[in-house]
Amino acid sequence: MLKYCVKRLLQSLITVLLIVSIVFLLMRLLPTDYYFREDELMKFTDEQKNERLEAEGLLDPPLVQLANFYRNMIQFQVTKGKSVVKAYALDQYIGMKLRGEEIELAKGQKTQWAFNLGMSRRVAAGQPVQKVIAEKMSVSMQIGLTSLAISLVIGVTLGVLQARKKDGILDRVGIGYTVFVNAVPHLVSYSLLLILGNKVLGLPAVYKAREPVNSLILPVTCLALGNTAGYMLWMRRYMVDELNKDYIRLAKLKGLSSTSVMFRHVLRNAFVPLAQYLPYSIVFTVGGSLLVESFFSIPGMGPMLSTAIPRYDLNLVQAIVMFYAILGVIGVFLGDLLMCLIDPRISLIRKGDAR
Amino acid sequence: MAKKQQRRKTVQELEQPVVKLDVDYSAVDKEPKKERPYGRAYLGARSAMPEEQLFEFAEYRPQDAEKIGYSNYSYWKSVWQNFVKNKPAIVMSIVFILLFIFTFVAESISPYSVATLEQDNKSIFLLPSSEHWFGTTQAGKDYWVITWYATRVSLALAALVAVGQIVAGTIIGLVWGYVRKLDRFFTELYNLIDNIPTIIYMTLIALMVGQSIGIMAVTMIAFGWLGTARNVRNLVFMYRDREYNLASRCLGTRLWRVLFRNIFPYLISVIILRLTLAIPGTIAYETTLSYLGLISEEYSLGILLKNARDSFLRFPHMLVFPAVIVSIITVTFYLVGNAFSDACDPRNHL
Amino acid sequence: MSQTNVQTVDFDARARQVLSQVPLLSARDLEVTFSLRGQKLTAIRGASLDLYEGETLAIVGESGSGKSVFTKCFVGMLDKNGSITGGSITYQGEDLAQYTEKDWLKIRGRKIAMVTQDPMTSLNPLKPIGKQILESVELHQGLKGKAAKQEVIRILNAVGIPEPERRYKQYPHEFSGGMRQRVVIAIAVACRPQILICDEPTTALDVTIQAQILDLIRRLQREQNMTIIYITHDLGVVANVADRVAVMYGGQVIEIGMANEVFFDPKHPYTWALLSALPQLGVKGEKLPAIDGTPPNLFNKIKGDAFAPRNRYALNIDYIEEPPMYEVTATHNVKAWLRDPRAPKVEQPKAIERLSELVKPAGTDPNAYHPHLDPNRETLVQVKDLQVTFGSGRKKFVAVNDVNFEIYKGETFALVGESGSGKTTIGRAIVRINPITKGEILFKGERISGKISKEMDTKVIRSLQMIFQDPMASLNERAKVDYIVSEGLINYHLYKNEHERQDKVQNALQEVGLLPEFSSRFPHEFSGGQRQRIGIARSLIMQPEFIVADEPISALDVSIRAQVLNLLNELKKQRGLTYLFIAHDLSVVRFISDRIAVIHKGQIVELAEAEELFAHPLHPYTKALLSAVPNPNPYVERVKQLIVYDPSMHDYSVDKPVWREIKPDHFVYGNQKELDGYAAELAL
């Protein structure tokens, strides 16, 4: 089990590194103008620009830059107040320690280990990007987890009820709902909900920092709308699949009533394939929903990329991509792990005694 | 039930005795024998044949025996029959076809045309009227011609992307599934791309390469083949080692022929399903991308919906027209796709 | 009745017992209709049946005869699109045909339980098997907690599952097919039912496992005093279990009687045909009396007797009116016009009389030519030290190991083994579908395994062909018969023009007994037997010298098997073909083959001439296999002694086993000590 986990994690790490590297290298193809703030671009002469670039190592060959990027991911920093005075890459620090050199600290200076992905240049100028991301995460998570919980409970329940009375009234209504939500573009259904919520219930149409709870009702509902339809659809389908299997026939032949068969056999088995994607969904609540958060102007993770990109905040873009890659990889990994735990047929260690 | 009673009656009328032959009752305890002679036969409407002839041997024809098990089942015929039975899908298809034809007519029956629209500050956000059938935009342009033009743009994009994705997906899937050595490579590639939401890639490409609708179409194809390819690959896996393919190998059939004659026909239903679902998928995706500002196009349904965001609370017509059209298109294809996939399932045939 | 052998079972006593009782359950004129996409299919067309307490009633029939649907009505488990549209099922004074789903909860499991066909899919994969049995125990025996668990463990023991405490917690995938079927039986038995319906419980299992399961069912019946309905298509199994036999055809019970009556004194032409088509009753070298055609399509309205078009004894009236049920004896009823006093008298076919002599070999044509006895015998195919492995690294699996044999021109060489024994792998290795790991395969002295030249490859393809097991999977459903049959011709362009190609296709179809007009149709329009013949035509068109027939009849109905066997024999005679006949059923193999090789876990353990193998089996596995083969004579089958083979009996740690010709043309695998023992056995 442990061996499998380590192997999978290593694989995941490679995936993340590969994606980040590709993105990093691709970004180096962009004009160097994007390394400056808008106001700096106006101010600086070409020489000044070159000087700056040279100093930050941005004129090095892309591969060298990539190596530096990874080297500096973990830094030992000397700080004074809030600003960083000097930073040592991990290998530099270890080298110094090995040589027995000490880092001299001036008065009022402190040292700390820090995770460094560079500074945001435009969106939140001068701030470390991880800090920019961290601030946004909590809002996204709130919305995400709430809507996930709602949609899971409602979606699974409705899906089960639909499958129980297949072709009944509830089933037909449910199918209509899932078709509507899945087929109609979200932008349209969100707009409809917005009109409804705003005109009828008087909920705010965009996020207002002063009324955070009211502001979040519509976004959460919008997000839950789509997810509920998804859970309903799949739960129903898996239930129907399971109900047609031979073992259900045998369970009925035992004399179990159809309700018992439902609860003791079908429900769990039908939930297993859904469960695989659950960790992914949970992990991704952190990432926020691009569309919903943009639509309601919520200061979450979602719109970050679409604000960072038009403004060419490269470090931020890089960090966001890395962040999503890690989320994705972890989500999939946890999903697989969960499957191993709940489905006895998947065994990580080969059991030899199957006869 | 009525039929059955009638049948009983005939039996009694005819008073045909239950036929018994060499019955040996010696070993039989006769007591509980009330129900015994069962399956009373009836000699109902009798043919014109005289009785002596009835009990002569009939001519035995092996060819007739060969024919009795014959069934006239045809796969595609059953698919079609099942599909036609799906009323919502058929109704929506008709509505869509009318709408599709109308997109070409709409502009010509209006006094305006997209090419000659100009900003007009006097007629901003006019409500629908006999002058402007769908009202006007924030720039005072006629919304009718814009909407229909945008519909054409979106449909063209959707068709292009859907076909591109399916063709790429099918070819890659066939190779992935049939060439064992490439399985690992494609699986890793798949995981690499699939681990991260596609929107991230789309954003990156928009950033690095550009936001024109053409580039976005290519990008959507480049990242959209995955689902189809995996689906096709799994099916190829399923059929690859079926006995009929082994038989083809025994007969020395070439690879391309096996792929084309033996495997491809089994994929057609999946490919059509994927194609019909890729169209609403692309249209919905286009609206999202447009909203996020990743597509820079003057008019498309996504752009119209995006532009409507700031005004539709006051001017609902900005939302309603593109929203209704986009919904008709996506719902139609979604329903048709699902109806087709149900119709293709042999379990629903019989 | 003319049986000469000892009557090991007193069927007359059982008959008296039956006649003294009121039926426990009785179905009358049952009619079941399925609606399938607008069409109506009448699966059961007025079937009647009585079931008596304590008996085992076997229902035999081909697929589509309605045997399974019929019994599903007894537990209220018809598929959703089916319903009982007429007749009644009386049980305990109530009509089960009128029951609602709620009513069924009183009966299902509690009174009438059922063992289903496929053990691989019948158990919930996500629940420990103990829990699944526990449900039955709690529900029907009212036990709870520890007591219930104790009972489950007792039942696991009773159905022959070793280490029940450990096994209790295991999941279905940790069990083999045979063990899973024991679990399924345990679940049914734990309900303590009065009636147990077994729906082909051994069809998916190997013969040796089948014999064990049959034993188990019989033992449980005695212990729990159950009444059993046993559904099967295998007459050997019927002989093993049945007190009474009901034969079904076209949705009706056409003959019912005590087992001895139905086997030794059948009256219905269909039963005659079914019995005489048994390869066990055939004379080697002669044609089997096959039944032409296929079972009826129940979508069509059937007029008169459903069997009439295939019946050689059909009367005119058979085409006009359905026959009534005639009473032969108090326990024996037949639904055939031939029993009418006005009908001509017909003697039952000779083959059926041979049934009573089945202890001895079925007989061979003394003048038959046996290629391997020919002093000038020519080796056509030679397999040398063959090894085939699948997978690699830790997952490596040796499917076939160290296999040696020669096949002589003109003979039928049989390879017999259970599922997973590697027999198919060998066949596929010969036709180059499976690559081999070690050893070599020679065809007419030339190597055809591994890398070979293009000309050689063409030669192999043209001279070596294969017939596949599953007629449903071996034809491309999306291609017309014309393309399927001529695929080989097209690949090598073996025709001058289109006209010649079509001619060749039609000739090939005619040769396998199909109508030439079939060429423009699609495979799904044909029945299993017809499809199998299309597959044979596809191989024949290449004019091969050697054909690997991979279980060509095991997926076919009993009545169809004889057609295909006859065809294969006929082709062999006409074209001088040589066959490698792969099978799991020794009784078929004895009829068709000259020599038999027995394979176990990838290793051939014994090889001998067919009759020699049956007369003097040496290897314990061969003995076990022979002992398990069902024999269609109930008197013999009921008393057969099962020999169970345990591979751990061999001690090959020091004394290594070898492949040795212990007597001319009789090879056996064993170490020196075992070989000495075998030699001594032969000398006796």
Image: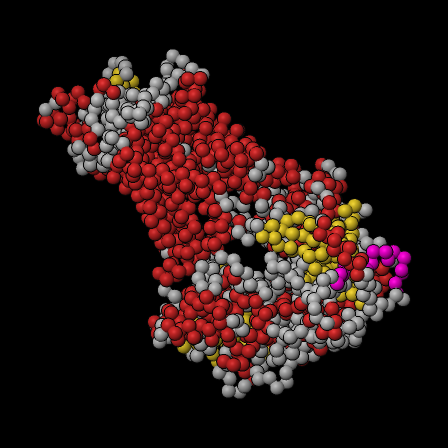
**Going 18% across and 25% down the picture, which residue do you hit?**
A36
Horizontal arrangement in the rendering, residue A110 relative to residue A179 (left or right): left
- Reply yes or no: does residue A351 show up in magenta: no
Residue A64 visible, this angle: no
* Along the line of sight, the residue nearer the viewer: C77 or B18: B18
Residue B82 % position (x, y): 50, 48
Residue found at the very far top of the displayed protein: A210
* Along the line of sight, the residue nearer the viewer: A138 or B152: B152
- The part of the chain drawn in magenta is B27-43
Horizontal arrangement in the rendering, residue A33 relative to residue C622 (left or right): left
Residue A125 visible, this angle: yes
**Going 68% across and 39% down the picture, which residue do you hit?**
A257
Give the main secondary structure of the magenta stretch.
loop
**Going 73% across and 47% down the picture, which residue do you hit?**
C97
Identify the image quadrant of the N terminus of chain C. bottom right
Q: Considering only vertical position in the picture, is C385 above or below A252? A: below
Quadrant location of residue B17? bottom right
Q: Considering only vertical position in the picture, is C239 above or below A270? A: below
- Reply yes or no: does residue B41 show up in magenta: yes
Residue B153 % position (x, y): 28, 37
**Going 33% across and 48% down the picture, which residue do you hit?**
B168
* Along the line of sight, the residue nearer the viewer: C660 or C18: C18
* Along the line of sight, the residue nearer the viewer: B338 or A112: B338
Quadrant location of residue B106? top left
Residue C659 % position (x, y): 54, 73
Identify the image quadrant of the C terminus of chain C. bottom right
Horizontal arrangement in the rendering, residue C524 relative to residue C246 (left or right): left
